[in-house]
Image (spheres, rainbow, N blue to C red):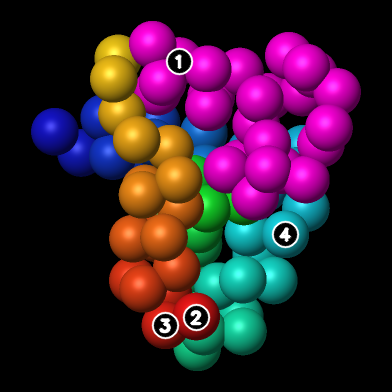
């Protein structure tokens, strides 16, 4: 299980490097570490602000979630609550 968590942490850090914002979000909310909530929030924020269809990782994440019948707008709102926005 520790290996899976390390992979997740590496993926989250890589995502933050590629998509600035989640590290700032973590710091803004007093979190000493970047977690998946920060990464997902940054990706969904990116998909909401990029008006080009299917562009960027955030758009792909939103499309994948929607394909699995996840309400992306509701998820974005829930993440905002969890982050204390």
Calculate the distance from the C-alpha at mark 3 to the C-alpha at mark 2.
Answer: 4 Å
Residue shown at the point (39%, 31%) measured from the top left: 7
Q: Earlier in the sequence, mark 2 or mark 1?
A: 1
Residue tagged 2: 85
User: Local crowd at mark 4 within 10 Å, few (<14), some, or many (≥20)?
Assistant: some
Calculate the distance from the C-alpha at mark 3 to the C-alpha at mark 1.
Answer: 26 Å
Residue tagged 3: 84
Residue shown at the point (45%, 68%) measured from the top left: 80
Q: Nearer the viewer, mark 1 or mark 4?
A: 1
Residue shown at the point (78%, 17%) measured from the top left: 53
User: Local crowd at mark 2 within 10 Å, few (<14), some, or many (≥20)?
Assistant: few
Q: Secondary structure at mark 3?
A: loop
Judge whether 12 appears above or below 79 on screen.
Answer: above
Dividing the picture into quarters, in which one does residue 77 lie? bottom left
Q: Earlier in the sequence, mark 1 or mark 4?
A: 4
Image quadrant where one finds the N terminus: top left
Calculate the distance from the C-alpha at mark 4 to the C-alpha at mark 2.
Answer: 14 Å
Are dots 3 and 2 in contact, CB under 8 Å? yes
Report the residue that reaches farthest toward the bottom: 30
Q: Earlier in the sequence, mark 4 or mark 3?
A: 4
Residue tagged 1: 64
Image position of 66 (left or right of 57): left
């Amino acid at each position: 299980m520790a290996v899976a968590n390390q992979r997740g942490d590496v993926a989250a850090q890589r995502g933050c490097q590629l998509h600035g914002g989640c590290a700032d979000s973590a710091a803004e909310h007093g979190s000493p570490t970047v977690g998946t909530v920060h990464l997902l929030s940054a990706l969904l924020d990116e998909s909401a602000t990029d008006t080009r269809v299917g562009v960027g990782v955030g758009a792909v994440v939103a499309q994948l979630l929607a394909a699995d019948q996840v309400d992306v707008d509701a998820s974005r709102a829930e993440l905002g609550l969890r982050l204390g926005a």
